[in-house]
Structures are given as C-alpha cells and as structure tokens.
Amino acid sequence: MLVEKVERTLRSFPVDELMTMREEGVLRVTCEFCKAEYIFDDAALAGFGTLHSSKKSVT
C-alpha cells in the first residue's frame, strides 16, 4: 500500500527535520501519480522513531 511507502520514506529523515517540514501543525505528502494526500500529525511524526505510530491519512 502506498501509505507504507510514504511512511518508509519519512522514517529516513530525522524526526526534528520532519518537524521543520510541517505547515499548520501537520506534514502533508501528496502522491504525484494518484494525487492522494497523506497527512501526518505531530504524534505520527514523533512515532516514526518507535515501533508504532498514530497516523492520519486522507485519500
């Protein structure tokens, strides 16, 4: 599933760098192929350093 690929890519960044990419408290990632939008809040971004995260996704 695409959201796992997006999460895997985001996990390659340091959490503090992800936090600087936020706008209005969330990080939005848009798939250029299908235009699906994935929205990650602070809890999800912080969770990328752990085994489980709470993500919000909107398609």
Image: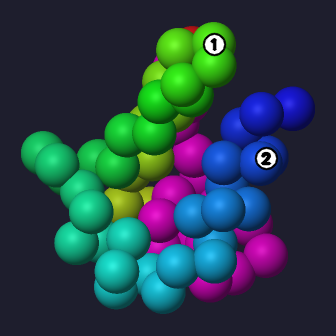
Residue furthest to the front: 33
Q: Quadrant of the C terminus?
A: top right
Q: Which residue is mark 2?
A: 4
Tell me the element at label 1. loop
Position of 44 relative to 33 (above/below): below
Q: Residue at x 34, y 85 (%)?
A: 16
Q: Position of residue 58 (x, y in %)?
A: 51, 20
Tell me the element at label 2. helix
Q: Is residue 53 inside the magenta stretch?
A: yes
**Badge 2: few (under 14), some or many (20 or more) residues near its Cα, within 10 Å?**
few
Position of 19 relative to 30 (above/below): below
Q: Residue at x 56, y 28 (%)?
A: 31
Query: Mark 1, mark 2: which one is toward the viewer?
Result: 1
Three-letter amino acid code at disc 2?
Answer: Glu
Which disc, if any, is residue 9? none
Q: Position of residue 44 (x, y in %)?
A: 51, 58
Q: Is residue 46 left or right of residue 36?
A: left
**Badge 1: few (under 14), some or many (20 or more) residues near its Cα, within 10 Å?**
few
Whichever of callouts 1 and 2 sits on the residue coming sooner in the sequence is: 2
Q: Which residue is mark 1?
A: 34
Residue furthest to the right: 1
Q: Residue at x 63, y 77 (%)?
A: 12
Q: Is residue 36 among the parts visible in the rendering?
A: no
Q: Is residue 47 among the parts visible in the rendering?
A: yes
Q: Is residue 17 left or right of residue 32?
A: left
Three-letter amino acid code at disc 1?
Answer: Cys
Residue 7 picture quarter? bottom right
- What span is in magenta? 44-58
Q: Quadrant of the N terminus?
A: top right
Cα distance between the residues tagged 1 and 2: 15 Å
Q: Residue at x 72, y 38 (%)?
A: 3
